Amino acid sequence: MAPTTLHPKFAQCPSRATLSALKNTYIIDNPAPRDPAAVAAVLIGVRYAEIRTDGERFSAAIHLRLGEWMPVAVGVTADQAFGAVAMFALRVADVPYFYAEAHDTAEREAAEEVLNAFTAPVSIPLAA
C-alpha cells in the first residue's frame, strides 16, 4: 500500500476533514476578507453554515431562512465548531431541501440536539 500523507491542516482539525469529505459539502476559508471573525462558510447542498471566532474561541451557526440563525456550537475550539457542523449535516441528510414547515422543524430540532451535545457539561462519576 502506498503511504498516505495527511495535509497538516487536516491533522490539526480532523472534524474539518470529516466535514469536507461529506457529499455535496464545500468549505470556503476566509469568506469575508474584511471580516476577520468569519473563519469559514460551509455549503451543505443548499444549506449554509458559518464558523466564526472572537480571537480565542469559535462558534458555528446554521442559516435556516429569512435571517434565522440556529447556533450549533458556541465557545468551542475550531475542531469542535467544524465537528458541530458535520454532526448537523449528518442529522439533516434525509431532510429534503425544499420548503415545508415539517422540514424547518426537523432542522431546528437537529440544530438544538447538536448545540446541546456541544454545551452539555460532562460529568463522570468517581468511585468512592
Image (cartoon, grey):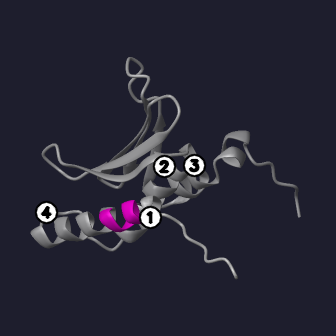
Label 1 and label 4: CA atoms lie apart by 31 Å
Q: Residues within 10 Å of mark 2 (few under 14, many from 20)?
A: many
Tell me which residue sits at (60%, 73%) in the image.
Answer: 124
Residue 86 vertical position relative to residue 124 in the rendered view, above or below: above
Q: Name the residue under label 4.
A: 99
Comparing 91 with 74, the one in front is 74
Of circles 1 and 4, the one toward us is 1
Identify the mark nearer the N-term, 2 or 1.
Answer: 2
Mark 1 falls on what kind of element? loop
Mark 4 falls on what kind of element? loop
- Residue 36 as seen in the image, left or right of residue 78: left
Of circles 2 and 1, the one toward us is 1
- Residue 8 as seen in the image, left or right of residue 89: right
Tell me which residue sits at (55%, 45%) in the image.
Answer: 77
Of circles 2 and 4, the one toward us is 2
Tag 2: amino acid: Ala
**Residue 17 image point, x, y percent:** 60, 52
Q: Name the residue under label 1.
A: 120
**Residue 106 image point, x, y percent:** 24, 71
Q: Name the residue under label 2.
A: 81
Tag 1: amino acid: Ala
Which portion, as a residue range, is magenta? 112-117
Mark 2 falls on what kind of element? helix
